[in-house]
Amino acid sequence: MKNGFIVLWLGLCTCRGGDAERPPADPIKGASGNSEASQDSAAGAAGHREGAVDSGSADISGDLGSMDATDPSRRSLDYDAELWTEVQAEEASIVLDIRYATADNFVGEPLYPCARCFMRPEAAVRLIEAHRALQAAGYGGLKLFDCYRPTPVQARLWEISPDPRAVAPPSKGSMHNRGLAIDLTVIDREGRELDMGTAYDAFSERSYHSFRDLPAEVRANRKMLRKTMAAAGFRPLRTEWWHYTLKGASRPLADFVWSCG
Ligand SMILES: [Zn+2]
C-alpha cells in the first residue's frame, strides 16, 4: 500500500468523486450544468472538480454497430448491454488497474466486488477509438484506473470523507457515477506506464495540466494523451491529468453493480 499517496488522496483527490463536476445542479434534473472545469479555467483547487456535463446535448451516438446488444453471441451477458458496455469485452488489449477493486486506494480496502470496467456505450466506443489510435501510433494503448463507479460506492466514499471540496455527495454524484468519466494513462508496448509526472491519484499542483515545472518528456506525454483523448471526444480535467469526460453527453446517476466470477 502506498501510504504517502493515500494520505494525499484522503486529503484532496477529486478523483474519488470529487468530480463534483457541476455547480449546484438543477435539483430536478440533477445532472447537467455549465461549470465545465476545463484546463483553461481559472486556478483554484477547491470546488473545481471534473467539470459538468456539457449542458443539454445528449446526442452523442457513436458507432455502436459492433456493440449490438441483440447480437446472439452477447446474449449471455450479465449486464444490460443497452445501458452499459464492458470495455474489455470489446477491446481485450486495454489494460485494467482498477484501484477500487483493491486495497490500494485511500480507504485501504476494496470497494468494488472485482475489477471490471463499464462505461456508457457512447463513452466506451470513443474510449476504444483512443486506445486504438495510441496503438497505431506505436504505444501499447490505455491503462484504466477507474471507469463507471456505482453510486453506492460514492456513498461509501462520502461516508468516509464527507467533504464536498474533495468528494462529490452521492446525491450530486460524479461523472464516474454516470458512466461518462474515465481515469487512465498510457502504456508503451512493453506495458510500462509513460511518465506523467505524478502517481495516478496524487492530488497536487503537479497533477494540473497547467503545471509547467516538469520534465519536457512528461509535458509531452500529457499533451499527447490530451490530444488523443480530445480527438476521440473527451475533455480533460484541469486539475487531474488522468481524468477525462466524454463531451456533450448526459446520463443519470446509476447504481448498477456488476457481478463477479
Ligand atoms: Zn476521475
Image (cartoon, rainbow, N blue to C red):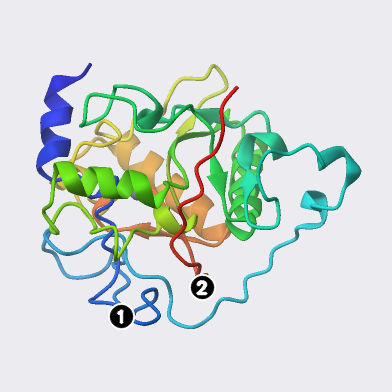
Q: Which residue is mark 2?
A: 248
The disc labelled 1 sits on which kind of residue?
Answer: Pro
Marks 1 and 2, how far apart at CA: 20 Å
Q: From the viewer's perspective, is residue 189 above or below residue 255?
A: above
Q: Position of residue 148 (x, y in %)?
A: 47, 47
Residue at 23% across / 76% down in the picture? Answer: 24
The local secondary structure at tag 1 comes to: loop
| Towards the viewer: 205 or 9 | 9
Q: Residue, x 65% and y 28% (percent of image)?
A: 93
- Residue occupying image coordinates x 52% and y 20%: 191
Tell me if the residue at label 2 has its CB under 8 Å from ligand 1: no
Q: Is residue 75 above or below residue 178?
A: above
| Residue 190 point in image, percent of width and height | 54, 16
Q: Are marks 1 and 2 in contact (CB under 8 Å)?
A: no
The residue closer to the viewer here, 44 or 166, is 166
Q: Nearer the viewer, residue 36 or 174?
A: 174
